Amino acid sequence: MKRTTKRGVAVGLVAVVALASAGAIVASQLGDSPPPDLAALDKAIQSEPMTRVADIPSADGLAERGVFVQVTSTGEVCLWDAPSAQARGRMGGCNDASDLLGGSKISASLAYDGGPATADVRDARMIGLVDPAVAMVRVLMSDGSYRTVKLLGSKIQGRSYGAFGYRFRRSDLAKGIGPVAVVATDASGTEIGRQPTGFGG
Amino acid sequence: MGRLWALGAVALIFLTLASSALAGIYAGPWRWSAGQGAGSGFSDHWLENYFATYGSGYDKTVTFIDNRTYGWHNTVRNTSGQTTTYPPYPGVYKAHCVANVSGFYGSCTVH
C-alpha cells in the first residue's frame, strides 16, 4: 500500500471515531442530557420498590397485569407494565425525574407480543402517565374508532399525574384493527397531546 | 510516520469498540434515522434490552426476535429516555432495536 493510501485510511478511521465522539458532544450541547449509567440504573430497577398506579385487566384468557411507577435512586422515574411489583421481567421505560413526561402532556408505552401484522398480535397493552391538565385519554384505532381509557390519579414525587393501563381486545386485533395513536384532551375537549404508536395504521 | 498514524487510529477504533462490547452495546452511540434498526447476536441468556437516548421524547422500539420463527416478542414502543424490555423464557433470542423517528443520538444495549 502506498504511503498516501495508508495515510488516507488512518485519517478516515480517526475521522469516524472523531465524528462518533463529536455527535455525543453535539447532542449534549443541543440540550439533550446524556443517558444515565445503565449498569447503575439496572441495579436500581432490580432492587428498588415499585408502586402500582393502575391495572391492566385480565381478558381473553390473559392474566391481569399492573402499571407500576418506580422512582429510582439514580434520578429516574420508570413506568412499567409488569405482572407484579416483584417481577423481574417488565416492559416500559424511564425518564429523568425532572421531566418524567419527556416534554409532553402524555407519555405512553405500547407493549405487544407477535406481529408485525396486527392480526398476528397475541396481546397488546398500553400504559401511560399524563399531565394533570389532561382530562381524557383515548386511543385512535386503525378503523377510525376510539377506545377510552380509564384515568386514575397518582402522586409522584409530590406532583399529581393521571395513570392508565389498557389491554386491546383480541377481537379488534384479529380483525386487523390496531392502535394508531394515543390522544390526550383537556376538560374542554381540546387535544393537548398525541403520541403515535405506528401500529395498525 | 504514516505507519504510526495507522497504528494509533486502529488502536483508537479497537478501544472504542472494546469498551462498547464490554458494556453490551450492540448499536451506537450514533445519530439515528427513522426506520433504522440493529440487532445483537442470538443467545439464551439475555436478560434485558435497552434503547437509551440523549434526552427523551424520541419514538423508538425494542424487542427480542426468536431463532426459529424470527417472530417478535415482548415488543415495547415508547418515547422514554430508556426504552426497555426482557425476553420470554425459555428460548434463544436476539435483541433488536428500531428508531421510529430521525435525528436523535443514542445506543442499544443488551445484557
Image (cartoon, rainbow, N blue to C red):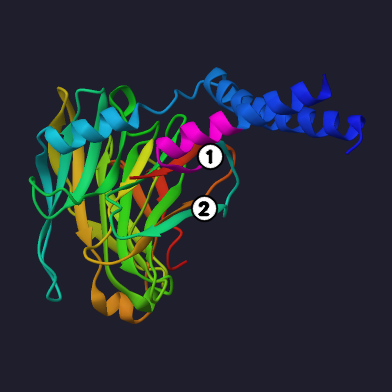
Inspect the image, locate mark 1, and give the three-letter code of the amino acid beneath it: Gly
Chain where mark 1 sits? B
Q: Quadrant of the rendered structure where residue A59 is?
A: bottom left
Q: Position of residue A40 (x, y in %)?
A: 27, 28
Left of A18 or right of it: where is A96? left
Seen in the picture, residue A73 relative to B94 is either above or below; the reply is above
| Residue labelled with disc 1 | B28
**Residue B38 image label:** 2
Chain where mark 2 sits? B
C-alpha separation, residue under disc 1 versus residue under disc 2: 9 Å
Left of A147 or right of it: where is A176? right
Q: How dense is the environment of label 1, judged by Cα within 10 Å: few (below 14), some, or many (20 and up)?
A: some
Q: Which residues are magenta?
A: B14-27
SS at mark 2 in the image? strand
| Dots 1, 2 in contact, CB < 8 A | yes
Q: Position of residue B38 (x, y in %)?
A: 52, 53
Residue A33 in sight from this viewpoint:
yes
Q: Position of residue B98 (x, y in %)?
A: 49, 52
Inspect the image, locate mark 2, and give the three-letter code of the amino acid beneath it: Ala
Q: Magenta span has A115? A: no
Q: How dense is the environment of label 2, judged by Cα within 10 Å: few (below 14), some, or many (20 and up)?
A: some
Residue at horizontal 48 percent and vertical 39 percent from the top: B107
Residue at horizontal 36 percent and vertical 53 percent from the top: A182
Assign the N terminus of chain A to one quadrant of the image: top right
User: Which residue occupies the foreground of this view, B54 or B86?
Assistant: B86
Q: Quadrant of the rendered structure where residue A112 is?
A: bottom left
Q: Position of residue A120 (x, y in %)?
A: 36, 77
